[in-house]
Image (cartoon, rainbow, N blue to C red):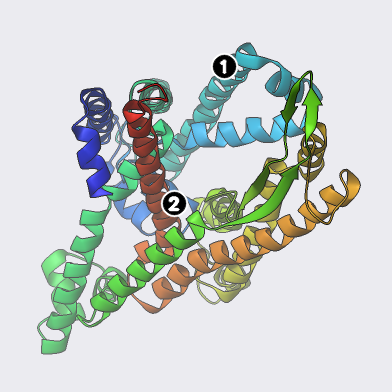
Amino acid sequence: MIQTVRKAWAIPELRKKIIFTLLILLIYRIGNAISVPYVNVAELEATLNSMGTTYLGLLNVMSGGAFAMATVFALGIQPYINSSIIIQLLTVAIPPLERLARDGGEEGKKKIQAITRYATVAIALLQAFGYYMMMQSYNLLTTTGVWPAIVIIVSFVAGASFLMWLGEQVNEFGVGNGISMILFAGIISRVPSAVSSMITGVRIWSGVRSGTLTVDYVESAFNYTTEQAEAYLNQALAPWVIPLILIGVLALVVLIVFVSDAERRIPVQYAKRQVGRKMYGGQSSHLPMKVNMSGVLPVIFAQSIATLPVTIWTFIGIPEEGTVAYSIYSAIDTQSILYMVVYFLMIIGFSYFYATIQFNPVEISNNLKKNGGFIPGFRPGLPTSQFISKVLSKITLFGAIYLGIVAIVPLIAGKLLPISSLAIGGTSVIIVVGVALETVQALESQMLMRQYKGFLE
């Protein structure tokens, strides 16, 4: 990977693209440090840190910590991602949109892109309004009224729209996928704070072990309540746990790289056919089917839906201990066994859903038949589509179980260890590794295109 970047840097045109991408990411990080007015940032950060494993915690990680600081880029690139997914689903469900995407050519793509942009602004407006209402209900605003509401909501929507534009600029003039690069930068920027929390955990552990850190001392030193002092001491982390975490993350990266490149290749043969005086076909090829077709989307969708009840309950107010409502809240909490089981099953369900949308066996079978191709041992038409469907079902099951394991293992680790950021670590690692692999492939294809000399030389 480092070798690829070094070779790309030696090519002037690619060097300009890399510098442009880095400048865009720098603008993104600067925007992440500019908070909107009328918000008590310290109180907001403390409130959202207590919701670390909910959907709001996921939004905070995806935005690089901007969500908890109420910056202009607080909504991150999520509105655009949600908009793209919704338009993609509607393209399958609504025949006019499907015809526009399939037969519209370049103009059709531009129209769908314009619809996606408008949908992004609408989703950002809804999310910004919801975020403002949450801050108001938790008394996190320094000034209330119509004007502060307009300023905060417009700032959030403008930030999300500007990020969408930055992503499109990277697609056109930079390296890799702009949206993926912004997500990548946001997640990577959280690494120093994760390392810092580990160091703090080790210090607390040594203080508790030596007897210098007690509940009474923390209460008097930091002006904490008893509950806050106990929560602070619960962050204690034994030094021997850190090597285990690093080994676990490395194993996760190896697994993700292995599965990302894994694919099932179905052999395809093309019959010979004569066109005029020339003979075409007679070649052997293969139909590649990736094990993890849908990427990280099933995890994001499953997490956003599975955490929805807890997130809404957190907005309303956590019930008191000892009540029936608190028992229900504990049962569906993001660290409960029930939540993990539902989360795992939803990942499998969404994986199958996305696989059927992205890979149509009937359409592929018809395309093979039109081009004179066939799978050895299966007749063209219905038998071929049935065989492809069967293979797709088996591959999707393996890919779904892999995604479920990657998402659930950090949850279990977060339950056993006092590091809340581990709970969404699986999703983050999949995105980071996937974007890194995608960017390296983009650089390699650009270099191959520029170094190809042709047949005449």
Q: Which mark is residue 364?
A: none
Relative height, residue 118 to residue 439 (above, below) = above
Location of the C terminus by quadrant is top left
Residue 291 horizontal/vertical position (percent): 59, 57
Give the number of the disc on residue 58: 2
Q: Is residue 261 visible?
A: yes
- Left or right, residue 365 beside residue 117: right
For badge 2, the amino acid type reads: Leu
Labels 1, 2: front one: 1
Image: 263 above or below 119: below
Q: Please tell me which residue is depicted at 55% across the width and 71% down the height of the picture.
A: 330
| Residue sitting farthest toward the bottom | 210
Q: Is residue 162 above or below residue 26?
A: above
Q: Count residues near mark 1 (Cα–Cα under 10 Å), then give few for <14, some for 14-19, many for 20+.
A: few
Q: Is residue 438 above or below residue 156?
A: below
Q: Is residue 89 left or right of residue 199?
A: right
Q: Amino acid at mark 1?
A: Ala
- Of label 1 and label 2, which has the lower sequence position? 2
Pointer 1 residue = 114
